[in-house]
Amino acid sequence: MPIPSEYFDRVSVIIITGGSSGIGSALIKAITNVKEAVAVCNLSRSKPDFFTEPNLHHFPVDLRDSAELAEAADGLQQFLSEAPAGKLVLINNSGFGDYGPIDTLDAGKQMGMLDLNMRALVDLTLRLLPQLKERGGAVVNIASTAAFQPTPGMSTYGATKAFVLHWSLALSEDLQGTGVQALAVCPGPTRSNFFRAAGFDRPPLEGGLNRWLDMRAEAVAEQTLEALAKGRRLVVTGWKNRLIAAFSSFFPKVVVTRVAGAALARLRLEQYRK
Ligand SMILES: NC(=O)c1ccc[n+]([C@@H]2O[C@H](COP(=O)([O-])OP(=O)(O)OC[C@H]3O[C@@H](n4cnc5c(N)ncnc54)[C@H](OP(=O)(O)O)[C@@H]3O)[C@@H](O)[C@H]2O)c1
């Protein structure tokens, strides 16, 4: 499926978090492939290694820190005041998980996860909402299929993604008639640095988990941009993930929690079996 280039003819600025790796990098590459001249502002701690062109701007920031986020947002507002007219697309993508029995996980890392996956996403969106309304455009929030059921073994992560999904869907309703679209994206397991960062120190596949379920970051990016161009509010990437999300939405929460817990515990056994 080709990336819908007509949509990006009307976009002049993309602001994305977490473009230095995985899904974020794939999104930037897919967009700049169809519209080379679009201005991209990336917010992450490290600079994307492919940021060599003058239209690709890196704002170094640890988004868990609200003071750093506020400073970066000021820089973005200054940038937008001088940017050419055209739509603005904000992609809230930065995020991480943490895997293991809850009492073995680092509490500080869990709090940082709440700050990055939820607080930073809301904070950045609200700070940029005036410019989004003025220019028109979209807010794209990267949630996860972990949002559809509790995830024992990744309890905090799954709950942050449930927040992102619900917040994003409600936002899309709140923004009706403003010219700003909100899209929640729910990828399933995707090959990236995610699993290593979450503490799966021996993933069976390099950068991924499961040959049957894993998707490539490029495919997730493609389906995200297609959904954006179609004006959708929610996309679950890949038919296998759509099946799992439908299962999780249909059965009682207690039942799907046990099923998810059993699936994640199997991974845990594999992780600890050295
Ligand atoms: N991979 C999957 O299976 C999967 C499935 C569903 C949803 N997701 C979601 O997709 C999004 C992207 O993940 P990914 O798979 O592409 O993982 P990834 O390769 O680990 O990328 C994570 C990105 O988040 C950025 N980030 C991490 N901590 C940050 C911080 N404190 N401040 C600013 N940026 C930070 C990283 O940049 P720096 O390290 O340079 O700061 C990196 O660019 C996440 O929200 C994740 O939850 C992933």
Image (tube, grey):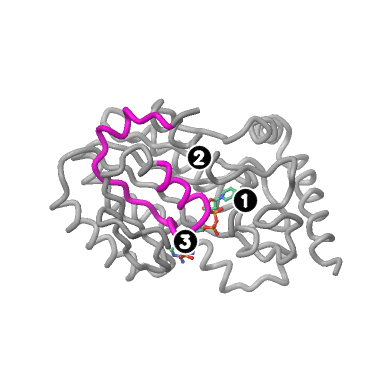
Closer to viewer: mark 2 or mark 3: 2
Q: Name the amino acid, label 2.
A: Val
What amino acid type should be assigned to the residue bearing mark 1?
A: Arg
| Along the line of sight, the residue nearer the viewer: 90 or 118 | 90
Marks 2/3 in contact by CB < 8 Å: the verdict is no
Residue ranking furthest to the top: 230
Q: Is mark 3 within 8 Å of ligand 1?
A: yes
Picture coordinates of residue 165 (x, y %)? 51, 42
Work out how far the residue at label 2 is from the one at label 3, CA to CA, in angstroms: 17 Å
Q: Which residue is mark 2?
A: 185
Question: Image point 19% across, 56% down: which residue?
Answer: 79
**Where does label 1 land, which residue?**
191
The answer to which of marks 3 and 1 sits earlier in the sequence is: 3
Sequence-wise first label, 2 or 1: 2
**Residue at horizontal 53%, vertical 43%?**
218
Start-end of magenta stretch: 3-30
Q: Nearer the viewer, residue 169 or 17?
A: 17
